[in-house]
Amino acid sequence: MSEILKTRQALTGNEAFAYAMKQINPDVVAAYPITPATEIVQIFSKYVADGEVDTEFVAVESEHSAMSACIGASAAGARVMTGTSSQGLALMHEMLYIASALRLPIVLAEVNRALSAPINIHCDHSDTMGSRDSGWIQIYCENANEGYHSLIQAVKIAETVNLPVMVTLDGFIISHGMEVVETLDTDAVRQYLGKRKPMYNVLDYENPIMVGPLDLPDYYFEHKRQQIEAMRKAKAVIEEVVTDYNKRFGFDFPVFAEAYRMEDAEYAILVMSSAAGTMKEAVDIMREKGKKVGLVRLKVFRPFPFEVLQELFKNVKAIGVMDRADSVNTMGGPVFNEVRSALYDLNSRPRIMNFVFGLGGRDFPLSDALYIINRVKELKEGKSLDFVEYVGVRE
Amino acid sequence: MADNFSISLKELAKRNKGLASGHRACAGCPFPAIIRMTLSASDYPVVVANATGCMEVTTSIFPFGAWPVPWIHSAFENAAATISGVEAAYKALVRRGEIPSDKKVKFIAFGGDGGTYDIGLQALSGAVERGHNFLYILYDNEGYMNTGIQRSSSTPYGASTTTSPAGKVLPGKLQHKKPIVDIMAAHGMPYVAQASVSHWNDYVKKVRKALSIEGPTFIAVYSPCVPGWGYPENKSIEVAKIAVETGFWPLYEVENGYYKINYRPRNPLPIEEFLKSQVRFAHLLNHPEAIEEIKKFIEQRWKFLEFMEKRREIEGIKEDV
Ligand SMILES: Cc1ncc(C[n+]2csc(CCOP(=O)(O)OP(=O)(O)O)c2C)c(N)n1
C-alpha cells in the first residue's frame, strides 16, 4: 500500500466517534441524544448543517424510533449508523433483535453508561451487557483511538457478514477524555469502505419482497439457525477485516483480545475497555517485583471468542475476571460467567474468580488494580476465596 | 373534493393490485378490500410498512406472503418510524444518484387502532412532525383484534371487549373514542381524512389525494371486525355503512387545517340501528342511559365538525386549499 496519510488529532471519545462517522458519511443517521453520547449526535448534526456530509439525518423522537428508522433505512439498502447509551440502548432493546434477525448491517456508536435505577449517568457496562443476546456483534474499545478505527472497521464487518455491530467506549472516562487519535485520510476511509451492497432492498419495487413476515413454528427455528450461523462466521470476518486493516494502514490493533505480558504468566487478569489501562500499569508494577502476572483485554464480546481465550489461558493457574456489570444472578458478572464456561474444557483448568468493579462510574484506582492482582495471586497459591468480590464498594 | 382524484370502479378493477388469494384474514374481514383499493388507487409504485396486528399476521405468514409490493414489518408501535427510515434512505439514495430522481415511489404505512391511537402514537406523531413524505393509513376496527379483542383507546363507549367486559357492575368500556383524526390534524399536516370501507369512492379519492401530496398525510378508514364486533360475516360493509348513516363515523377531511364534511346522512338512522347490529353492544340495549351517552357523543362530534367547517366560510375561502 502506498503512503497513507494519517493525522494526529487531539479528540475526545465522542469526537473520535463523530469524526469517524463524518468520514464514513453514511446514507442515513437516525439518532436521539443521551448523556454521555449526546455529543456524537450534536457534532454529527453540525456536520450535516455545514454540508460536510450529505447524510440524511433523521432527528427522531426516541431511541425506539431511532432504531426503527435505522431498520427501515437499512432494509432500503442504505448505509446506516446511530449512537446511544444506557436507557437509550435499553429503549432500543426490542428493535435490536429485529435489526439482527433481519440481517441489517447497522452500526451503532455506543457509550457505556449505568442503567437506572437509581439514575446515574456514569460508566459501567450494564447497558450493553443487557443486549448481549440480541444478536449484535459487540466490540469494546480501550480508548478513543481504538474506538475511531473500530467504528470504521465495524462498517466493513457488518456489511460483510450482514449483522449489526455496536462499538463501545466507556462513558465520560473515554467519551469525554481527550487523547491523541491517529485518524486516516477521509479519502482512504471512503475508498476502503466503498459502497454497500445490500443483501436485499425494499425499495426495489420491480422485485418486491416482504421483510419481517410472521414466522410460525415451521420456519422460525431455521431462520434463527441461519442467524446464529452468521454470528459464528463473523469470527472469521472480524479476523480478516482487522488483520487487513492493520496491514493496509499500518496498525497493530488486536483482533479479539489483547494479550499483555502473557508469555510466561502464571496467573492473569481479564478485563474489558478503559480499565485495561490502569490494569496494565498494575501488571507492570507487579512484574517489576518479579510476579509472573499477565493481562488479557477482551475486545470482542459477541461473538464470544472462546477459542482465543482457551489458547491464551491454557498455561495459567489462576484468573481474575473483571466485570463492570453484574448479572444479579448471585454468581457473578456476565463476562465472568462466559469466561468460566469457555475454560471448563481445558485439561489444566485454572482457578477463576470474579471482581465486579466500577458500577455507576465508581473510580477504579491503581490500588484496587493491585489488590485484584494480589487476590488472584492468593488464588493461584491455593487460598480459598469467595468466587465473586465487589471491589471499591463500601460494605 | 376536487374531482381529478376520482377513478371509476371499472378502472380500479382493471388495475386490481391487491393481496394474493390465500391470505388468512377472517372471512368477511374488510381490510383485504382496503388494501386492494389502496394499492389500486396509487398511480405510483409503493413501498409499505405494516404495524404488528391482524393485517400483518394474516397477510405475511412465511412463506405465503400475500403482498404484491415491497413490504416491511418490524414491530407493533413503529410503522411510522420504520417508514421514516425507508423514506430517508430513498431521499439519501436519490441525492447520491443511486436511484434515478424520476423514479417516484410512494410510502405507505398501515396500522391498526392499537398501533396508531395507543402504543404507536408517539412514533406517528414524531414522523409527522419531521415531515416525512408518507401516507399513514389507520384501519380502525376499534380494538386489539389480533390479541383477542381487547379495548383500545378507539373502542367506543359501552362496547364489551375482553379487557372492558360488560359485567354485573360495569357496562363495558367507560370512555369514548379518542379523536385521532383531529389529533393528527392538530399536527398541521397537509392532509388528514376519515373514510369508511363502505364508501369506496370517497376512500379511493382520499387515498389518491393523499398520495398526490408531498409530506405526511393520514387517513383513518373504518374497518369493522366480524369476530370482534359480533355480526354475520357477510355484513361488514353494511355495518360500516350503518356507522356512517347513524352519524357515528362521519366522513370528513382536513386540508391544511380546513375541515370539510364529505357526507351528511340525509335522514340519519337512529344510533340503536348501529348498536343492534353487533354483539359487543348487545348488553346496552337495556341501558338507555348508556345509549344517551353515545348520542351525546355523536352530537358533540358533529357540532365540532360543523364548527370547524365554518373556518373556510369565515375566512372567505372558496377554493380547495
Ligand atoms: C410492544 C408490544 N406489545 C404488545 C404486543 C402484542 N400485540 C400484537 S398486535 C396487538 C394488538 C393490535 O391491535 P391493533 O393495532 O388495533 O390491530 P388489529 O390487530 O386490531 O388489527 C398487540 C397488543 C406487541 N406485538 N408488541
Image (spheres, grey):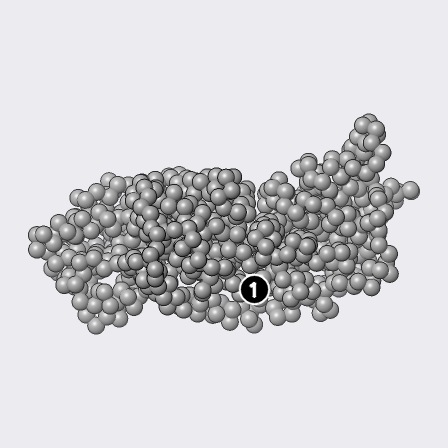
Q: Position of residue A361 (x, y in %)?
A: 31, 41
Say above or below: A310 vs B268: below
Q: Nearer the viewer, residue A368 or A157?
A: A157
Instruction: Name, please, the residue furthest toward the left.
Output: A289
Give B163 or A261, whichever is nearer the viewer. Answer: A261
- Residue at image position (44%, 70%) is A229
Residue drawn 52% across the image and 48% down it: A55
Q: Which residue is mark 1?
A: A200
Residue nearest the viewer, comparing A194 with A57 = A194
* Figure check: A385 above or below B68: above
Screen quadrant of the N terminus of chain B: top right
Task: Describe residue B13's horizontal placement relative to residue B46 as left or right.
Answer: right
Q: Which of B22 and A76 lies nearest the eye of the viewer?
A: A76
Amino acid at the residue labelled 1: Tyr
The image quadrant of residue A73 is bottom right
Left or right of residue A339, residue A71 in this image: right
* Residue drawn at x 42%, y 40% as measured from the top left: A39
